[in-house]
Image: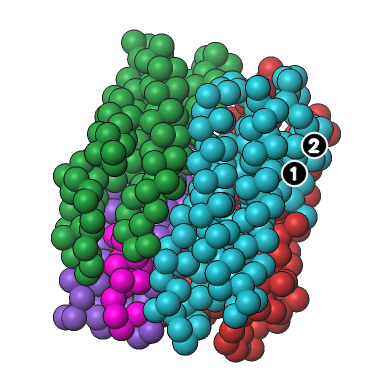
Chain colours: A purple, B green, C red, D cyan
Amino acid sequence: MIRAGEMLDAYPADLGAVDRTALMDCIEACFECAQACTACADACLSEEMVRDLAKCIRTNLDCADICGATGNVLSRHTGYDASLTRAMLQACATACKSCGDECEQHARMHAHCRICADACGRCEQACLAVLSGLG
Amino acid sequence: MIRAGEMLDAYPADLGAVDRTALMDCIEACFECAQACTACADACLSEEMVRDLAKCIRTNLDCADICGATGNVLSRHTGYDASLTRAMLQACATACKSCGDECEQHARMHAHCRICADACGRCEQACLAVLSGLG
Amino acid sequence: MIRAGEMLDAYPADLGAVDRTALMDCIEACFECAQACTACADACLSEEMVRDLAKCIRTNLDCADICGATGNVLSRHTGYDASLTRAMLQACATACKSCGDECEQHARMHAHCRICADACGRCEQACLAVLSGLG
Amino acid sequence: MIRAGEMLDAYPADLGAVDRTALMDCIEACFECAQACTACADACLSEEMVRDLAKCIRTNLDCADICGATGNVLSRHTGYDASLTRAMLQACATACKSCGDECEQHARMHAHCRICADACGRCEQACLAVLSGLG
């Protein structure tokens, strides 16, 4: 279980005007989505119809990298920079939308794509929620 | 919540002789520890006594990188290679031991170090459990 | 030496309308900047005045994560998605601008910050060059 | 161009008994190999015979993650921990050996596998050279 909430409580300085719950949810959603995308890419590789899943695997890999980087950026509060956080949240929401849409197309046939589409949707919403709170 | 278990259930081919529960626990522990280490490094940066925490921050950063890479490696099952998995689990257990020992020394004074030491300890044990099952 | 150019030449399908030289330069600049930021954060940690460098270290770590993820995204061409590439290049240019500006302030006193500011500036320009070619 | 050498020169404290040239070569080889593996995995995805390359793609992805983490660990010198560095170099050499052997099998047919096998071989040797100097 990602301990983002405990870690936010233990931060030794002021977190600023951020919505703490939205931030905690988003950090967790980023790591959840990164793992789901990494696992979905690998599961796609094991499917007989892998040729039809090449775009899905590529989007999975991009989304995993971007969610991982976003989860790290959001886990840091020292020397906070709103423009950088905003740009990264926008990139992450875009990646989750692309990957979620792609996985959705294979969700009926492949359970791993359905689980991954869910994780992407949750992460996209969590990014948008933090973004809307940044003003 | 990391969906490693759901993703293991959805894997379209045989997982081989691996202990499924140990693997799921280890994947989750790796991502939990990576996030805790990233957050602990940043919290240390905000402490007035940051000069005394330089070694702690460095070990946090190493452990975060290694746990993230290990969580990814363990999330892949296609084309499984026991020697690579074993070497990475050993590196991860070593990193978690170093980082946990270092954080433990600051655990009374800094709550973030206490939480991070817990995450490191759990991840080290989870790596050793998967390793012992690899034979 | 990053072999991005050789790898682009070896890509087995059409790369599309991308400016090949701009793309190759940007991939190399992303990995160069990621390494420089990781090394600069660590060098800052070894400075006696580390407390004055906390914001610099944080921006280094963010920039390293974002440049690494961007270098990976740009290294993939299968199932190309312009909106995702564009969002990530914008996040990367923003991170490089923030980190370069911060390092620039310490460039006279610390050689590692000067080298890192150079790497950030090159990577920001390389991202903007690819972005302008995306139309 | 990875600036590992410049960054080593700019490190504000003693680097210890490390072989500076071997370290610089290894940092560069790690980032070169990470990029080559990421690009090779994507190029394999674009091949018509992708089903025959599933193991190659998986090994590419593992090797990319491990080389990236190793390059980061080697870029940090503050609070140096020989046991952690040694374990990570061993994991990286193992990953490069596995990935290089796999890519070698496809090197005649696919230029990207040949370039990637070269990068893996160079990185494996660079890791072993640093390891032998650690005593």
| Quarter of the picture holding the N terminus of chain A | top left
- Is residue D65 placed above or below A16 in the rendered structure? below
Work out whether residue B59 or residue B7 is closer to the camera in this orientation and state it: B7
Q: Main secondary structure of the magenta part?
A: helix
For the point 55% across and 69% down, which residue is it?
A: D105
Given residues C62 and D45, the one toward you in this image is D45
Q: Secondary structure at mark 1?
A: helix
Mark 1 burial class by Cα count in 10 Å: few <14, some 14-19, many 20+: many
Q: Residue visible at 27% across and 34% down?
A: B132
Q: Which residue is mark 2?
A: D21
Q: Amino acid at mark 1?
A: Asp
Q: For mark 1, name the chain.
A: D
* Residue B116 image position (x, y, % from top left): 35, 27
Mark 1 to mark 2: distance in Å? 6 Å
Q: Quadrant of residue C130?
A: bottom right
- Horizontal and vertical percent position of residue A46: 31, 71
Residue A39 in view here: yes
Q: Are marks 1 and 2 on the same chain?
A: yes
The residue at which mark 1 appears reads as: D25
The residue under the point 41% across, 11% down is: B105
Left or right placement of residue A91 versus residue C56 in this view: left
Range shown magenta: A35-50
Task: Kindly identify the amino acid type of the residue bearing the numbered disc 2.
Answer: Thr
Q: In the rendering, at what x and y percent does residue C71 appear?
A: 59, 62
D131 horizontally vs A71: left or right: right
Quarter of the image containing the C terminus of chain A? Answer: bottom left
Question: What is the quadrant of residue D38 in the picture?
Answer: bottom right
Q: Is residue B110 above or below residue D99?
A: above
Residues at circles 1 and 2 in contact by the CB criterion of under 8 Å: yes
